[in-house]
Image (cartoon, grey):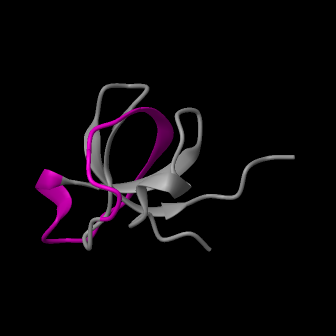
Amino acid sequence: MINGQQRSDIRPGMRVEIILKKDQRTGKRTVGTVKDILTSSSFHSRGIKVRLEDGQIGRVQEVLADEQ
């Protein structure tokens, strides 16, 4: 399981679970496909911030297994 704290683990096109800003209190996760990586540093303790294909922005909590 990849937890989304290392920028090098995340690439556009990957399926990920993110937490949106509005869901930080509840921990509700949103599943989507990465479009852009918004965090410039190589590591972030709360998760790398990404934009999904549908435009939602949040921090990666988990990288989901690629469908083979």
The structure residue drawn at horizontal position 12% and vertical position 71%, both measured from the top left corner, is 25
Foreground residue, 66 or 38?
38
Please provide the residue range marked out in magenta: 21-43
Is residue 48 part of the magenta span, yes or no? no
- From the viewer's perspective, is residue 45 above or below residue 20? below
- From the viewer's perspective, is residue 44 above or below residue 51? below
Is residue 39 part of the magenta span, yes or no? yes
Using residue 8 as the reference point, say whether residue 42 is left or right of it: left
The structure residue drawn at horizontal position 31% and vertical position 26%, both measured from the top left corner, is 55
The structure residue drawn at horizontal position 19% and vertical position 71%, both measured from the top left corner, is 26
- From the viewer's perspective, is residue 44 above or below residue 30? below
Using residue 64 as the reference point, say whether residue 39 is left or right of it: left
The N terminus appears in which quarter of the rendering?
Answer: bottom right
Q: Position of residue 18 (x, y in %)?
A: 37, 55
Q: Quadrant of residue 5?
A: bottom left
Using residue 28 as the reference point, say whether residue 11 is left or right of it: right
Foreground residue, 47 or 27?
47
Q: Position of residue 23 (x, y in %)?
A: 19, 59
Q: Position of residue 3 (x, y in %)?
A: 48, 71
Q: Position of residue 27 (x, y in %)?
A: 26, 70
Foreground residue, 41 or 57?
41
Task: State how many labels appear.
Answer: 0
Q: Residue at the far right: name it.
A: 68
Foreground residue, 29 or 6?
6
The structure residue drawn at horizontal position 56% and vertical position 69%, both measured from the top left corner, is 2
